[in-house]
Image: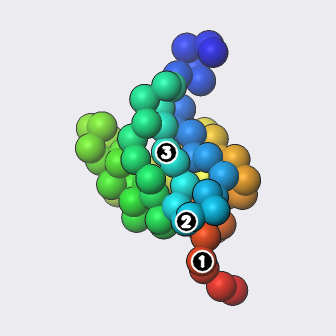
Amino acid sequence: MDAAEQLRVVIEPPTPGGGRRVRVGREILGLAHGPADVLEFCRRTGLDPDAIDLTGDLFVWHGGGPEVWPGETS
């Protein structure tokens, strides 16, 4: 893993039980159940949630982007 990847927030695919694991490098920040949870985890790491673009380069989404959450219907 290169240094740039360690600085990115990685959101894993939705789990069968609900939620998506969020991590930075090897550190797990928590299990998010929606975009607000991802923003809260970022806030706890010192980032300003009001300045965050969930579709920006800071984030790596696996299994769908910020619009994909378990249990949600369109």
Q: Secondary structure at mark 1?
A: loop
Quickly name the residue at label 1. 71
Q: List the single residue furthest toward the right.
A: 63
**Looking at the image, which residue is at 69% across and 86% down?**
74
Q: Position of residue 39 (x, y in %)?
A: 39, 55
Q: Which tag is nearer the camera, tag 2 or tag 3? A: 2
Task: Decide which of 73, 65 is in the foreground and name it.
Answer: 73
**Looking at the image, which residue is at 55% across and 55% down?**
20
Q: List the single residue furthest toward the bottom.
A: 74
Q: Secondary structure at mark 3?
A: strand
**Looking at the image, which residue is at 63% across and 15% down?**
1
Amino acid type of the residue that numbered disc 1 sits on in the rendered structure: Gly
Q: What distance separates the C-alpha of mark 2 from that of mark 1?
A: 7 Å
Q: What distance separates the C-alpha of mark 1 from that of mark 3?
A: 18 Å
Q: Earlier in the sequence, mark 1 or mark 3?
A: 3
Is residue 48 among the parts visible in the rendering?
A: no
Q: Position of residue 22 (x, y in %)?
A: 49, 45
Task: Decide which of 20, 53 is in the foreground and name it.
Answer: 20
Q: Secondary structure at mark 2?
A: loop
Quickly name the residue at label 3. 22
Q: What distance separates the C-alpha of mark 2 from that of mark 3?
A: 13 Å
Q: Earlier in the sequence, mark 2 or mark 1?
A: 2
Amino acid type of the residue that numbered disc 3 sits on in the rendered structure: Val
Number of on-image labels: 3
Q: Position of residue 48 (x, y in %)?
A: 31, 47
Is residue 32 among the parts visible in the rendering?
A: yes
- The answer to whether the residues at label 2 and label 1 have Cβ atoms under 8 Å apart is yes
- The answer to whether the residues at label 2 and label 3 have Cβ atoms under 8 Å apart is no
Give residue 18's mark.
Answer: 2
Amino acid type of the residue that numbered disc 2 sits on in the rendered structure: Gly
